[in-house]
């Protein structure tokens, strides 16, 4: 065996190596010529995680931006304002990226079909839909009005309560994205969302506790 | 020495002929083995080449078999053309902000674009029960809204059907429009569809095409934080 291996080695490996190089060169050339990136660049299907997630999360994020801008107008706590400033910017940018992906994939930004179908969740009830609660964790229109009307510490506290729930729903949705056929950029963003929103949930709980304690000390 | 040779029986000493015959036999076997090895190698190489050719051909075929990769065309929504059967398309609409009233063309109601108020009408799934000021509503169209208007003659059941499609859904809004000739009209920036009934399947098709669609001159712009009442 050893001798055979020694004897065949160099002469046998040469054509294989040459073949591999030729193949690689050929593939690269083809890629360059056709202007198509290899693998991964396929357009996700209409019912894929990538398309469903991008559509639904763009809507979900839009509400987070709206709530954050609301508390930036009327809130008091510097900590809450910093967080809201962060969330508004981050989620507005991420929403733009998701809508951009949809455009590049040739998919419409929205569909009249029920949301969350891609993640096997039951469709929103007609009642929830009417209230504006289209997806997990979303605030109702009444909640949004209450937030817009609240001032000072009440606005801070309500924002934290609504945004903790909102983030929990967002994490749940982002966790539903499977690696199966999902472009890397989408998968990466979903994973990052899970991580950063979890961290922010902890932060918000912490702030809420402190603000609650301070409020209690002031009034009581 | 190698395992190969150790597999052969030891060469008996003393008998020259027998030893020569045994050596010849060994050489013959070596030659055979070498030939077999060459054959195997040639076979492997030929197989490899064939496989490579197959892979390359497959690659070429898959690339040519794929439809032309122009992502902008893939959704089939071309902002400058008819995308929903029966809709009307308008081009070269002005976009300036103006404080006062705008004289929108009388033959296109509600207006599908043009100069508008600096403040947009909220269209975050807002259902208005009174007619909207057009100067504000047009600004929402610019942000990617589909605006549903209905004739005041429309039966209440149909109004409810429309409401169910609009209420709470971002970038959709609805309002009555007294004197509107057709019962229901859907308007996006530069696009308008008139239907006789809320149940017309083209209603959903129009929403799908234009809610935050490519026709919007300001994509990503908000439909909250604007004018909240008619």
Image (cartoon, coloured by chain):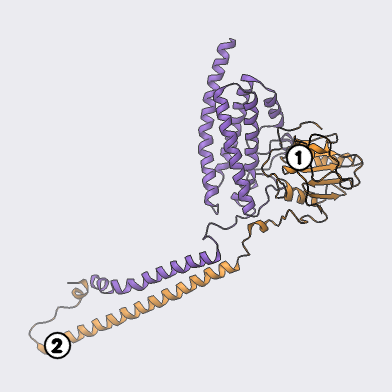
Counting from the top left corner in percent of width and height, residue A197 is at: 54, 35
Chain B visual colour: orange
Residue positioned 83% across, 38% down in the render: B134
Q: Which residue is denoted by mark 2 in the rendering?
A: B20
Name the disc covering residue B139, or none.
1
Q: Residue at x 17, y 84 (%)?
A: B23
Among the chains pictured, the one given purple colouring is: A
Residue A149 image offset from top left, x and y in percent? 70, 23
- Seen at 61% across and 44% down, the residue is A96
Q: Position of residue B2 (x, y in %)?
A: 20, 72
Position of residue B25 relative to residue A148, above or below, is below
User: Is residue A178 at all visible to an observer of this figure?
Assistant: no
Q: Nearer the viewer, residue B224 or A126?
A: B224
Could you tell me which chain the residue with mark 2 belongs to?
A: B
* Quarter where residue B15 is shown: bottom left
Classify the position of the N terminus of chain A by image quarter: bottom left
Give the quadrant of the C terminus of chain A.
top right
Identify the element where label 1 is drawn: helix
* B105 relative position to A30: left or right: right
User: For residue A59, which numbered disc appears in the image?
Assistant: none
- Tag 1 or tag 2, which sits nearer the N-term? 2
Foreground: disc 2 or disc 1: 1
Cα distance between the residues tagged 2 and 1: 104 Å
Q: Quadrant of residue A175?
A: top right
| Circle 2 residues within 10 Å: few <14, some 14–19, many ≥20 | few
Name the residue nearer the viewer: B33 or A81. A81
């Amino acid at each position: 065996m050893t001798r055979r291996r020694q004897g065949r080695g160099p002469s046998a490996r040469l054509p294989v190596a040459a073949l591999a190089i030729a193949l690689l060169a050929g593939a690269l050339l083809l890629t360059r010529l056709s202007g198509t990136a290899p693998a991964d660049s396929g357009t996700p299907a209409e019912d894929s995680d990538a398309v469903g997630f991008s559509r639904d999360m763009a809507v979900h994020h839009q509400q987070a931006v709206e709530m954050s801008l609301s508390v930036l107008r009327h809130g008091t706590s510097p900590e809450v304002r910093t967080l809201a400033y962060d969330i508004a910017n981050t989620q507005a940018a991420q929403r733009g990226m998701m809508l951009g992906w949809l455009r590049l994939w040739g998919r419409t930004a929205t569909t009249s079909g029920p949301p969350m179908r891609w993640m096997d969740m039951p469709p929103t009830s007609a009642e929830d839909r009417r209230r504006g609660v289209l997806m997990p964790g979303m605030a109702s229109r009444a909640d949004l009005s209450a937030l817009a009307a609240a001032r000072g510490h009440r606005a801070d506290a309500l924002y934290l309560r609504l945004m903790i729930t909102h983030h929990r729903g967002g994490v749940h949705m982002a966790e539903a994205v499977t690696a199966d056929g999902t472009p890397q950029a989408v998968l990466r963003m979903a994973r990052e969302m899970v991580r950063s929103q979890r961290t922010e949930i902890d932060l918000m709980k912490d702030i809420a506790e402190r603000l609650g304690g301070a409020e209690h000390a002031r009034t009581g | 020495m190698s395992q190969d040779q150790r597999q052969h029986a030891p060469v008996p000493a003393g008998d020259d002929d027998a030893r020569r015959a045994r050596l010849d036999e060994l050489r013959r076997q070596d030659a055979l083995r070498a030939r077999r090895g060459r054959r195997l190698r040639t076979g492997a190489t030929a197989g490899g080449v064939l496989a490579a050719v197959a892979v390359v051909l497959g690659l070429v075929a898959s690339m040519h078999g794929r439809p032309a990769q122009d992502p902008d065309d893939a959704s089939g929504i071309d902002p400058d053309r008819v995308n929903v059967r029966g809709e009307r398309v308008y081009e070269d609409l002005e976009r300036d902000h103006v404080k006062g009233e705008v004289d929108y063309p009388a033959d296109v109601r509600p207006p599908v674009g043009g100069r508008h108020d600096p403040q947009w009408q909220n269209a975050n799934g807002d259902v208005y029960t009174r007619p909207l000021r057009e100067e504000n509503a047009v600004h929402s169209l610019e942000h990617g809204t589909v605006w549903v208007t209905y004739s005041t003659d429309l039966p209440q059941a149909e109004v409810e059907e429309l409401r169910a499609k609009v209420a709470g859904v971002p970038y959709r809004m609805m309002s009555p429009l007294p004197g509107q000739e057709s019962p229901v009209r859907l308007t996006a920036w530069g696009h308008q569809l008139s239907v006789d009934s809320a149940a017309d399947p083209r209603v959903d098709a129009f929403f799908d095409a234009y809610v935050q669609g490519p026709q919007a001159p300001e994509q990503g712009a908000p439909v909250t934080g604007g004018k909240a009442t008619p």
